[in-house]
């Protein structure tokens, strides 16, 4: 009986270790599955650049960028 319990504990530990390596990283700012290769809400370029790409400097004025935060993409403020 002790041997069966020990074997079960080893299998559970191995399964937990394997599952944690395959899981995406959760963003620290409130959710999402940052690191899964998909830019999904609430992820954005600020919270998860590995899925959503770089924010400023990509030649596109995209939210949350504006003339104050990224004049190189959005142009000067008027």
Image (spheres, rainbow, N blue to C red):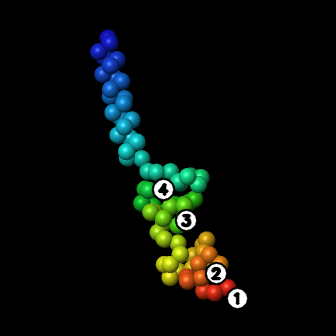
The residue at 43%/56% (across/down) is: 36
Residue under numbered circle 1: 78
How packed mark 1 is, by other alpha carbons closer than 10 Å (few <14, some 14-19, many 20 or more), is few
Q: In front of the other: label 4 or label 1?
A: 1
Disc 4 to disc 3, how far (Cα)?
11 Å
How packed mark 3 is, by other alpha carbons closer than 10 Å (few <14, some 14-19, many 20 or more), is some
The residue at 48%/78% (across/down) is: 58
| Relative side of 2 to 66, left or right | left
Disc 1 to disc 2, how far (Cα)?
9 Å
Residue under numbered circle 4: 34
* Residue 41 screen position, x and y as percent: 56, 60
Q: Are marks 1 and 2 in contact (CB under 8 Å)?
A: yes
Disc 4 to disc 1, how far (Cα)?
35 Å
Q: In front of the other: label 2 or label 4?
A: 2
How packed mark 4 is, by other alpha carbons closer than 10 Å (few <14, some 14-19, many 20 or more), is many
Earlier in the chain: of badge 2 and badge 4, it is: 4
Q: What is the number of the mark on residue 56?
A: none
| Relative side of 76 to 60, left or right | right
The residue at 62%/75% (across/down) is: 69
The residue at 57%/59% (across/down) is: 42
Q: Secondary structure at mark 2?
A: loop
Q: What is the number of the mark on residue 46?
A: 3
Residue under numbered circle 2: 67
* Residue 3 screen position, x and y as percent: 29, 15
Look at the picture and state if 46 lies above or below 28.
below
Disc 3 to disc 2, how far (Cα)?
16 Å
Q: Are marks 1 and 3 in contact (CB under 8 Å)?
A: no
């Amino acid at each position: 009986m002790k041997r069966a319990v020990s074997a079960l504990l080893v299998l559970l530990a191995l399964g937990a270790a394997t599952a944690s390596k395959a899981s995406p990283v959760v963003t620290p700012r409130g959710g999402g599955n940052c690191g899964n290769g998909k830019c999904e809400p609430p992820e954005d370029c600020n919270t998860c650049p590995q899925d959503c790409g770089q924010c400023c400097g990509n030649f596109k004025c995209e939210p949350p960028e504006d003339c104050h935060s990224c004049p190189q993409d959005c142009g000067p403020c008027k």
